[in-house]
Image (spheres, helix red, strand yellow):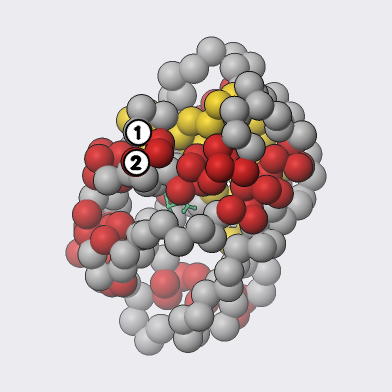
Amino acid sequence: MAEINLLRRYPRSTRNIGVRTAAQSEENIRIAREYGREYFDGSRDTGYGGYRYDGRWIPIAEDMIAHFGLKPGDRVLDVGCGKGFLVKDLSKVCPGIEAFGLDVSEYALMNCEPEVIGRLHLGNCVKLPFPNNSFAATIAINVVHNLDRAECIAAIKEIERLSPGRAYIQVDSYRTPAQRQIFLSWVLTAKTHHDPAGWRQLFEEAGYTGDYYWTIIEA
Ligand SMILES: C[S@@+](CC[C@H](N)C(=O)[O-])C[C@H]1O[C@@H](n2cnc3c(N)ncnc32)[C@H](O)[C@@H]1O
């Protein structure tokens, strides 16, 4: 199990992010957690404010392929794949790779990138509908923190089951009280959150042996 930032080439947000005076409203949180149109393509108050393909996952796909030594014919699964941007770019960077995605959002799958039609499964990461050890690597970026603690552990166990020791999980976190404050004032969907030490403990509890890193909102 290693701490490694496989999203180091992901563009930094250009938004001016600081502590908000008011936390997100309960109504916005409720809407966001439906993972429908409002979450992906509605306003910033309820989610992404427009979740569109722009090629930003290409360098991440390159780093994932290099890190796991993936090659044509290998199966890789992106859990919480949204519209399939990373699935598309894994196939673009490594033609012949068998890239798949799974997401709980029917909206995301119905509005996926044309190149990944048929490669995305509708499902919940607490129970992944694939046999043990069936992927060369499993990836879950900013997904499992959206579950409560018990479900989060169940999802991590599932990820471990599909590709023992060959997975990458990224989750919301904070290192300082100031970062925690910013996180709490912006959070919409996360139900489980910890500092890195807390996450490591949770990973251990789940028997996770893959790699991991943190999404930290900086001021
Ligand atoms: C913050 S987005 C991340 C999307 C993508 N991985 C990325 O980094 O752009 C969270 C994604 O997890 C999905 N999701 C939330 N809960 C889920 C669950 N229980 N099982 C599977 N997917 C889930 C959402 O629909 C959404 O696509």
**Relative image position of residue 187 (x, y in whole percent):** 42, 66
Q: In which quarter of the image is the C terminus?
A: bottom right
**Relative image position of residue 46 (x, y in whole percent):** 27, 65
Q: In which quarter of the image is the N terminus?
A: top right
- Disc 2 to disc 1, how far (Cα)? 6 Å
User: What residue did someone put label 1 on?
Assistant: 117
Contact flag, marks 2 and 1 (Cβ < 8 Å): yes
Kind of residue sitting beneath label 2? Pro
Q: On the rendered structure, is 79 left or right of 136?
A: left
How packed is label 1: few (under 14 Cα within 10 Å), some, or many (20 or more)?
Answer: some
> Is 156 drawn above or below residue 6 in the view shown?
above
Q: Does the residue labelled 1 lie within 8 Å of ligand 1?
A: no
Residue at the image position 51 percent from the left and 51 percent from the top: 142
Q: What element carries label 2?
A: helix
Q: Is mark 1 on a helix, strand or loop?
A: loop
Residue 193 in sight here: no
Kind of residue sitting beneath label 1? Ile
Q: Nearer the viewer, residue 42 or 142?
A: 42
Q: Say how many tags the image has.
A: 2
> Is 130 drawn above or below residue 3 in the view shown?
above
